[in-house]
Amino acid sequence: EDQVTQSPEALRLQEGESSSLNCSYTVSGLRGLFWYRQDPGKGPEFLFTLYSAGEEKEKERLKATLTKKESFLHITAPKPEDSATYLCAVRYYGNNRLAFGKGNQVVVIP
Amino acid sequence: GAGVSQSPSNKVTEKGKDVELRCDPISGHTALYWYRQSLGQGLEFLIYFQGNSAPDKSGLPSDRFSAERTGGSVSTLTIQRTQQEDSAVYLCASRLSGLAGGPGTDTQYFGPGTRLTVL
């Protein structure tokens, strides 16, 4: 069974306090790992796709990295507008669907 | 360009009634997905359409749930005889599905969702 686990479930940060979110997944057959941002009452917004261990992607204050068994989303010097739930999803070979974790709820306090 | 759109944005219904939820994918996207997001749960896959192929219905939780996609574009998710446990946000996503592994063909783009409340 596909399993994607995100930690921590919830995180409160002071503005400017950098941190990392973790996403671990079932190891075999990874085709791609996806990060999305979801604001309350909205659909998930695509951030990054990672395909192979060692790959990194950056966008503004966010950087996503991938190892053979987990991914990290690093938030550098966060601002209040970075407050959101960050979703990790995995697509395995032979499967067209995405398997999602439950999300990391991030609150950045001014 | 326009993103994925869904309607209605909110739907309140009584237990036992049927509901229809609509999804308009991004133009040119041949792959379409429905997911369900319940409070405190991750997104749960429901059904997948790809072009003219038979849909992957393996995620539908019961035979009260069905979906169709007309003309390779708009999709409708129907829930018959709704139950309170069907209350959730229903999300639609589309994907540009070109040659296997081609750039941009893996990413699913989501609509804003339909919040369904069954009283």
Image (cartoon, rainbow, N blue to C red):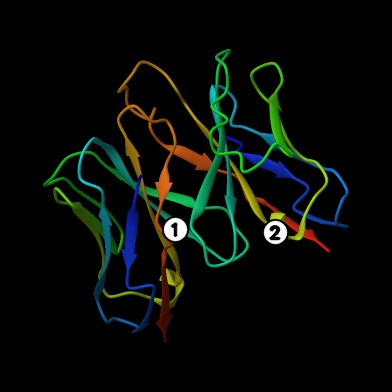
Using a 10 Å C-alpha cutoff, classify the residue at mark 1 as few (fewer than 14 neighbours), some (14 to 19) or many (20 or more).
many
Judged from the image, the secondary structure of the residue bearing numbered disc 2 is helix
Q: Which residue is mark 2?
A: B85
Q: Chain letter of disc 2?
A: B
Can residue A42 be seen here? The reply is: yes
Using a 10 Å C-alpha cutoff, classify the residue at mark 2 as few (fewer than 14 neighbours), some (14 to 19) or many (20 or more).
few
Judged from the image, the secondary structure of the residue bearing numbered disc 1 is strand
x, y percentage for residue A36? Answer: 42, 53
What amino acid does circle 2 point to? Answer: Glu
Could you tell me how far apart the alpha carbons at marks 2 and 1 are, in whole angstroms?
A: 26 Å
Q: Is residue A78 above or below residue B71?
A: below
Residue pictured at 52% horizontal, 49% vertical: B44
Front residue of this view, candidates A77 and B46: B46
With B64 as the anchor, is B15 left or right in this view?
Answer: right
Q: Is residue A83 above or below residue B48?
A: below
What amino acid does circle 1 point to? Answer: Arg
Q: Which residue is mark 1?
A: A37
Point out the frontmost of discs 2 and 1.
Answer: 2
